[in-house]
Structures are given as C-alpha cells and as structure tokens.
Image (cartoon, coloured by chain):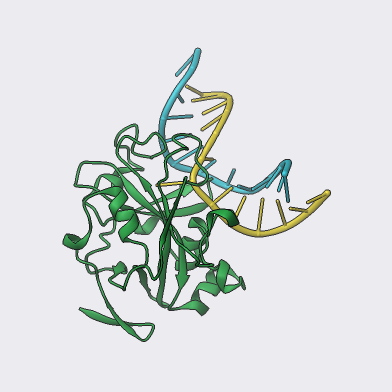
Chain colours: A green, B yellow, C cyan
DNA sequence: AGTGCGATTGACT
DNA sequence: GTCAATCGCACTA
C-alpha cells in the first residue's frame, strides 16, 4: 500500500525483501526510510547511519542470551527493539536474523524528511542537521519510546520501514561508536558525504 | 542486597 | 577537553 510521504510515494518494505543477515541488513537499511505515523502526524527520515550487532558479539545485548529486556532482538528480522540507555535515552534497533537468533541493527542517524516541525517540538529548536543525528536524538525526534519495543516494522502499524531508493553515494565503514567490547570490527555503516551522520568528523567522511 | 556501568547527550571549563 | 543525569540489568557475595 503506497502512502504519500514527502511528496513521494513510499511503500512498506516487505520482510521477504530484508536480507537474513545482520551485516547485510545494516548496509541494506542505509538510504531506506523510517516512518512514524503518530497521532500528531507523520514523521519520517532517511536512514544514513547504522551499526550491526551480530550473533556472538560481546558488545551486543543478546550476547548473554534472552532476557525480558532484549527479547525483541530474538524476533524475526524487521521487528523493533527499543531500550533505554544511560537511564534516559531510547535507542532503536531492527532485529536482523531468523526468529530465535538474537541480533540487531542500531539506527544511529536520519536525514529528516516529513514532520520536521513535529520533530522540533520533541527536540527543541535544534539545527536541522542535528535533529536526528545520533541514536538518542533520532528516537527523541521521532517520538520513539519503549511503547514501540517489539513492533513489527514490516506490518501495518505506526512505525515502519519505507522502500526508498537506497544510498545515493558510497557506503562508508568504521568501528562502532561508544562500545567497550569488540571494538575493532568495522560494523558501523554510513552514507559518505552526508552531514546528517553522527560521530567524530573524521568518521563522517 | 549492593555495586558498577553503559550501543548518549548537553552543558560547561 | 570534562562531567552529570538516571535506571535497568548483570554481576558479586
């Protein structure tokens, strides 16, 4: 079902289109659209930065097995895993493997498209560049919280993934940001030359 | 039962 | 550059 979004028609990504592999999904999601149809209106953004938290990853929340908090990581690919970080920020992941395997892709930054005034209402008068630049800011701008944990992003519902064109340029790769274990692997992906990407400046080019 | 620490951000020196 | 906010969960005992 096509829905008008930012002047373009974007439809939901079907689960069968999602790669059944965490790293492949992290790359696939670059350039796709995240949409939140909230009561106050639609918010959407182009995904420009992701991180893969793979099977057996000591930095991943699923590393020590299934718990009440991380159970959404074990859902079939394409479900939301939302958790609270540092007691105050919400971070959004997309589960990334078959049901029963705990792994996910963290969404770290968006280029805002629809509902920018609404995002500003959530975030304050931040520059457009900073509205959803960083995983905590992304969730705050989009109005995402624990109530979205476990939602199917490929089904009818308020939060979904839109089938936009994909990356316009090259996909860059770097180490992940802010972790203390398994720090060496290049599991962060971002669209090169895009100002909406988070992290230190040298890891944005 | 107590402790320590984040997949972060914003304010401040 | 440093640091506090703030809380669920893993880990120790």
Instruction: Name the residue at the bottom extreme.
Output: A7
Instruction: Name the residue at the front extreme.
Output: A170
A195, above or below A190, in the image: below
Q: Quadrant of the N terminus of chain A?
A: bottom left
Q: Is residue A5 left or right of residue A101?
A: right
Residue A123: x and y in percent read 56, 68
Q: Is residue A80 visible?
A: no
A141, above or below C9, in the image: below
The residue lying toward the viewer, choosing from A84 and A28, is A28
Residue A53: x and y in percent read 36, 44
Residue A46: x and y in percent read 40, 70
A34, above or below A118, in the image: above
Q: Residue at x 51, y 47 (%)?
A: A177
Q: Is residue A76 left or right of residue A182?
A: left
Picture quarter containing residue A158?
A: bottom left
Q: Residue at x 40, y 63 (%)?
A: A170
Picture quarter containing residue A8?
A: bottom left
Q: Residue at x 46, y 38 (%)?
A: A184
Q: Is residue A3 visible?
A: yes
Residue A205: x and y in percent read 53, 60
Picture quarter containing residue B3?
A: top right
């Amino acid at each position: 079902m096509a829905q008008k979004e930012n002047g373009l028609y974007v439809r939901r990504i079907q689960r069968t289109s999602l790669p059944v592999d965490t790293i492949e999904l992290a790359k696939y999601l670059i350039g796709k659209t995240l949409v939140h149809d909230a009561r106050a209106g639609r918010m959407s953004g182009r995904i420009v930065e992701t991180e893969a938290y793979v099977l057996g990853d000591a930095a991943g929340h699923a590393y020590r097995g299934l718990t009440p908090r991380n159970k959404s990581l074990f859902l079939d690919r394409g479900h939301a895993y939302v958790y609270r970080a540092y007691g105050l920020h919400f971070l959004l992941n997309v589960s990334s493997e078959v049901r029963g395997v705990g792994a996910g892709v963290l969404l770290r930054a968006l280029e805002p498209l629809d509902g920018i005034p609404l995002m500003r209402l959530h975030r304050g008068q931040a520059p457009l560049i900073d509205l959803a630049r960083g995983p905590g800011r992304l969730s705050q701008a989009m109005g995402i919280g624990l109530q979205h944990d476990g939602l199917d992003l490929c089904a009818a519902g308020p939060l979904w993934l839109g089938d936009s064109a994909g990356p316009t340029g090259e996909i860059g790769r770097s180490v992940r940001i802010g972790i203390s274990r398994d720090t060496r692997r290049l599991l962060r992906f971002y669209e090169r030359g895009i100002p909406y990407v988070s992290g230190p400046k040298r890891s944005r080019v």
